[in-house]
Image (cartoon, rainbow, N blue to C red):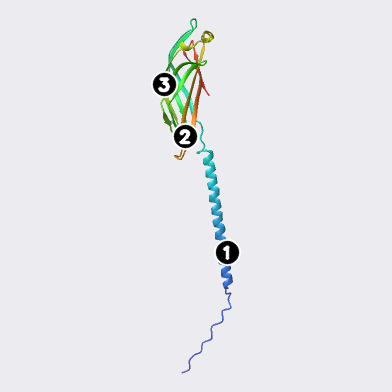
Amino acid sequence: MAEKAYPAAPANHGYQRSDAESLENADELKRKKKIKLAIYITIFVVFQIIVITTMSLTVMKVKTPRFRLGNINVENFVSNSAAPSFDTKFTTQIKIKNSANWGSYKFNAANITFQHQGATLAVIDIAKGKAGWLSTIKRTAEVSLKSSAINGSNFGSELSSGVLTLNSVGRLNGKVAIMFIMKKKKAANMNCTIAFDVAAKNVKSLHCK
């Protein structure tokens, strides 16, 4: 019995990719990956520069804390313009303001001096302490002042004018600690002017620099 003969399969005349083209496509893919990687690295570097710059201008920038007197509550005020003298007792707030720093402010013990035209009337002590980051601490102090140390010739006329002006000065020495890695020394100065209304026996104004 004769075997059947089958026609040969037609030759495949379709497009065949050469090895050179395959290599070229592979190189193109690698080039695109390298470009993407370079873009990502550039974006990351720019982002880091922005973050570092922002931190340098805000978080890492250390400002001098403020050292001020706060509200004054006069408990007693006695004066005599004929035989110039006065005696007063009041309570006041002592404010250490660290609200501009992203780190705590540790300060040493200090004092505040109350004066009249350079003459010292009283000195109060400030215990060492710490003001937290972005915060203000307030302490209450009781102050007693007498005019026995005043020798100025115009003291009587000042009392007669109805306004008695005193000053409070002080200095805090301490360090601001930023993120537990950087400490910077900062000294906060107090320079306040207190005007007493002699007739009303209270504080007319309080200004601090």
Q: Which residue is mark 1?
A: 28
- The reply to whether discs 2 and 3 touch (Cβ–Cβ < 8 Å) is no
Amino acid type, callout 1: Glu
Q: Nearer the viewer, residue 18 or 119?
A: 119
Classify 10 Å Cα crowding around label 2: few (below 14), some (14-19), many (20 and above): many
Which mark's residue is nearer the viewer, 3 or 1?
3
Q: Residue at the spot x=57%, y=65% of the render?
A: 27
- State the separation of the CA atoms marked 2 and 1: 55 Å
Label 2 or label 3, whichever comes before in sequence order = 3
Q: Nearer the viewer, residue 205 or 190?
A: 190
14 vs 27: above or below: below
Q: Which residue is mark 3?
A: 141
Q: Which residue is mark 2?
A: 176
Which mark's residue is nearer the viewer, 2 or 3?
2
Q: Residue at the spot x=49%, y=31% of the render?
A: 186
- State the separation of the CA atoms marked 3 and 1: 78 Å
- As helix, strand or loop, the secondary structure at mark 1 comes to helix
- The picture places residue 61, in percent across and down from the top left corner, at 52, 37
Amino acid type, callout 2: Val
- The picture places residue 20, in percent across and down from the top left corner, at 58, 71
Label 3 or label 1, whichever comes before in sequence order = 1
- As helix, strand or loop, the secondary structure at mark 2 comes to strand
- As helix, strand or loop, the secondary structure at mark 3 comes to strand
Residue 198 is tagged as: none
Amino acid type, callout 3: Ala
- State the separation of the CA atoms marked 2 and 3: 25 Å
